[in-house]
Amino acid sequence: RVLKLPSLNISETARLENPRPKWLATRGQTNDDVPPEMWGMRLDQWAAFIMTCCFTNTWSELERDIGQKDAGHVNLYQINTSMVKPWTRNTGSSVALLMNSEKPLKADVMISHAW
């Protein structure tokens, strides 16, 4: 007898295969506790976060996916679904607040998103 497994879409696969980075705090101040202007991160923190995403188990798969964009690129929708949401789930915090859990940073620039 053959067990048929349900097919997984990319976001489900990413949740299963991208363990939370060890350097990312598991708790800290929450988005409810800290005003939005204090949800900042330094440029080097942003670069470290993106580099961590690049080395996840599913980055290559996300690059090949053509569902939301051209092959060869990973967009922020994919990063949000595959890394941000799983890594911040049940914390009440953003990546920025988890990276700066002891002392949130005031944002100097706001870069918006479309989700």
Image (tube, helix red, strand yellow):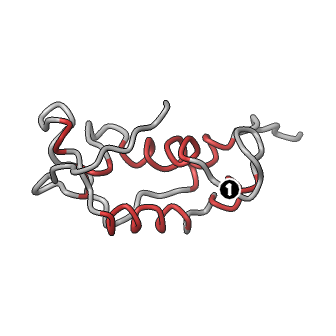
Q: Position of residue 83 (x, y in %)?
A: 48, 50
**Residue shown at 74%/59% (left/top)?**
72
Circle 1 crowding by C-alpha within 10 Å: few under 14, some 14–19, many from 20: few
Above or below 58: residue 28: above
Measured from the top left, where is residue 88 in percent x and y?
36, 44
The amino acid type found where label 1 is placed reads His
Quarter the N terminus occupies: top right
- Is 49 above or below relative to 39? below
Q: Residue furthest front?
A: 109
Please give the name of the residue rendered at 69% of the width and 62% of the height, measured from the top-left corner: 60
**Residue 61, relative to residue 88: is it above or below?**
below
Is 47 in front, or is 65? Answer: 47
Q: Secondary structure at mark 1?
A: loop
Q: Which quarter of the picture shows residue 100?
A: bottom left
Task: Work out whether residue 30 or residue 89 is closer to the camera in this orientation and state it.
Answer: 30
Q: Is residue 5 left or right of residue 50?
A: right
Q: Residue 42 in the image: state x and y as whole percent.
A: 27, 62
Residue 87 vs residue 67: left or right?
left
In the image, taking residue 110 as reference, residue 17 lies left or right, namely right
What residue sits 37% from the left and 40% below the top? Answer: 89
Total labels drawn: 1
Please provide percent x and percent y for residue 35.
14, 35
Residue position marked by numbered label 1 in the rendering = 73
Which residue appears at 47% of the width and 66% of the height?
A: 52
